[in-house]
Image: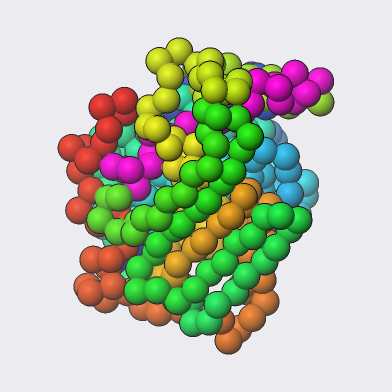
Amino acid sequence: MQTTLRSDLSLDGIGLHLGETARVTLRPAPADHGIVFRRVDLPGRPRVPARWDRVIVAPLNTRIESDAGVSVSTIEHLMAALAGCGIHNLLVDVDGPEVPILDGSAACFVSGILRAGIQRLDAPLRVIEILAPVSVRLGDATARLDPSESLRISFEITFEEAAIGHQRKSLNMANGAFARELCDCRTFCRAGDVTAMREQGLALGGSYENAVVVDGAQVLSPGGLRRADEAVRHKMLDALGDLYTAGAPILGAYAGQRAGHAVTNALLRALFARPDAWAWKTCDAEIGARLPGVGLTLADLPAVA
């Protein structure tokens, strides 16, 4: 069955890019509504669906934009939380151009969603079944989707900084794995990139409190890493959020290598350009048991949440 939130949930924080205080409020929505963002700070409260064909390539984040040019940035962590908790319908009110970054992970979103409660709706859920391999390459970055009975995410990254180095991880996202394994993993950057981003007007709200900053073998953020491979886990978190702009849960195996938001969006565009590579499938109890979020409880959350 489809789901939504049981009650409203509001969270406040700083926007990563503009550095302005923002509030996001998650509101229950009816069946077949999907995930839709609403800019409540603008006249008419314009809406923007969180869909792959609304994604605009932007540096360091996922941004969606309406036909009228209204946009919402940095939706990926919230989208990952919704995917990982199995939320299919939601109206997301935001009072500015970007979703607050909070602690740089999805843990606050997941914790809030579970405390607000998840409501089952009397409507069948359709999932996107991958039928044939689809892949894309942008420079040295690649991403691929293959058929699978459940959503699996694999990722590989390589950085010169010894604090990150080469990391590889693969997870089956069923049964609360996102909450247990990924949701607390923060966005990261290299110290040498911070000045360059600020000069370009980016990451104005970034700090050691909402990102992992590394310099060579050092982790500059207070408290260090939450997990030894936090960087690759965060890339998996991002990938889950970007994949959820497909408009429904995916039954398939995603593999990314040095991939970012633009690469995952390019992969979705390649997928939907090939009718032979995917199909809608009505979710029965057997399929539902393999989806992210099924059986998830607050006990699954890491202590940081």
Say which residue appears at 57% left-offset and 66% top-offset: 144
305 w.r.t. 270: above or below: above
What percent of the width, then of the height, locates residue 73?
Answer: 64, 38
Q: Which residues are magenta?
A: 178-199
Which quadrant of the rendered structure holds the N terminus? bottom left
16 w.r.t. 73: above or below: above
What percent of the width, then of the height, locates residue 124?
Answer: 33, 72
Residue 182 part of the magenta segment: yes
Give whichever of 245, 134 is nearer the camera: 134
Say which residue appears at 58% left-offset and 55% top-offset: 257
How has the structure been colored for display?
rainbow
User: What residue occupies the far bottom of the structure in this picture?
Assistant: 276
What percent of the width, then of the height, locates residue 40?
Answer: 60, 34
Give whichever of 249, 252 is nearer the camera: 252
Res 139 → quadrant: bottom right
**Would you say residue 101 is visible in this rendering?**
no
Say which residue appears at 18% left-offset and 37% top-offset: 299
Give whichever of 79, 70 is nearer the camera: 79
- Horizontal relation, residue 161 to residue 140: left or right: left
Residue 260 part of the magenta segment: no
Give whichever of 16, 181 is nearer the camera: 181
What percent of the width, then of the height, locates residue 220?
Answer: 53, 15
**Would you say residue 235 is visible in this rendering?**
yes
Q: How many marks?
A: 0
- Horizontal relation, residue 113 to residue 94: left or right: left
305 w.r.t. 254: above or below: above
Say which residue appears at 59% left-offset and 43% top-offset: 158
Res 289 → quadrant: bottom left
Which quadrant of the rendered structure holds the C terminus? top left
User: What residue occupies the far right of the structure in this picture?
Assistant: 200
User: What residue occupies the far top of the structure in this picture?
Assistant: 222
